[in-house]
Amino acid sequence: MSNHSVYLFCTGHRSDWCISRSNVVACAKHYVGDGGTTGGIDESNTVATFNELRRIHLPPYYNAIAAGVATIMVSYSSWNGVKMSANKFLISTMLKQRLGFQGFTISDWEALDRITSPPDANYNYSVNVAINAGLDMVMVPMNYQGFINLMTAQVNAGQISQDRIDDAVRRILRVKFLAGLFEKPMADRSLLQMVGSEEHRNLAREAVRKSLVLLKNGKDSTNPMLPLSKNAPKILVAGAHANDIGLQCGGWTITWQGSRGNTTVGTTILEGIKNAVSPTTQVDYLVSPDSGNAANGGYSYAVVVVGEPTYTEMFGDNDNLTIPQDGINLIQNVCSVVECAVILISGRPLVVEPHLPLMSAFVAAWLPGSGGQGVADVLFGDYDFQGKSPRTWFKNVNQLPMNIGDQSYDPLFPYNFGLTTGVGKTG
């Protein structure tokens, strides 16, 4: 983490990390095991021993705390049937005492309501177990006055101790002091010009370059496809995801679920490719070509871009994790007749093994956001691939959950896998 986040121990040579108009208060979430729920269902139950939780799910929080993250949001999900928002062992004992977290914990949106099933069945109980578990700040978007009244009554009745309240207030004030909110409580509007600045767009483009993961390059090791030639006479770019910033961004973009279309300023992958190739190269863009279009176009190669629709939270629940059918059709139609590089736009690994033999190259681009030019930077060899897969890539969903270290570990691509081409810059 850079010095643009608030460091919780602002002493000595780190004193410049404290009050500064360029600092932000970082939040790590969602604590803990949110990515390990049964079937990957949002807000569901993570079934795991404590050793599994410690080995698989806690390490990112070790690193975040060591880097000085100031707040941690507690997950909606459960661990072995106990809601995280009510889990005193994991919030107070593990996070605050054993890991030494000095910042404050915060609940997710209306998380206290969801401690009970159905939600809000006993809000008085939910307030009691959540605050006593160690939640310091509670996100109550609607009935905040009711929350305040209930918590105050419980403190007065001794059901929530004054020490617990003092701990929460102390932690919140510590972060606010270190963030300089008492000296400068309002946003510095002189920084508004930085939003969408060229410097930030260049940083986003760099992030895209460095996060791309090359999973296959050539149908055999002696004949790599990437980097692509910039001087090919005629190439095909195919797929709706190749020319749609909204699909590149995914959910939580402009709106909650995101949407299709060029919803914000940026560069699509298609535009990036057109900017990268020679002025004499003809770039044909087809959303859904059939095999005849592809075979008879006289193309040197094709770049096929497929992926998921936009989604977030429960709208992303998916028990088959297959590429949407239009993407499968696209791979089959184009890659069966033209040498092709397939770019996958997704928020997670998807089932690709059945289609992999058709591909000459396969790149996981995740969600490159508005920086489509960063994809072209690497495809054409100006920069080399640096990304390593942050997740084990499964062959089929029946293998899930699957984590490195499992006895039956048999992935399509193992955790931390990523090829390079050996050409281009790496910075």
Image (cartoon, rainbow, N blue to C red):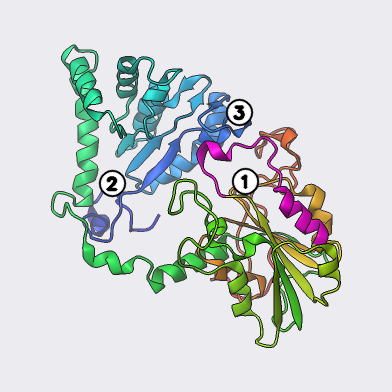
**Quarter where residue 147 is shown:** top left
| Residue hosting label 2 | 8
Mark 3 or mark 1: name the one nearer the start of the chain.
3
Report helix, strand or loop for mark 2. Answer: loop
Circle 2: residue type: Leu
Q: CA distance from mark 1 to mark 2?
A: 30 Å
Residue drawn 50% across the image and 30% down it: 43
Left or right: residue 156 versus residue 78 is: left
Q: Badge 2: how crowded within 10 Å, few (<14), some, or many (20+)? A: many
Label total for image: 3
Residue 418 visible somewhere in the drawing: no
Residue 22: give x, y in percent of width and height. Answer: 27, 61
| Residue hosting label 1 | 391
Left or right: residue 25 versus residue 216 is: left
Residue drawn 18% across the image and 46% down it: 177
Depth check: 74 or 66 in front?
74
Q: Nearer the viewer, mark 3 or mark 1?
A: 3
Circle 1: residue type: Arg
Q: CA distance from mark 2 to mark 3?
A: 35 Å
Q: Badge 3: how crowded within 10 Å, few (<14), some, or many (20+)? A: some
Q: Which residues are magenta?
A: 310-333
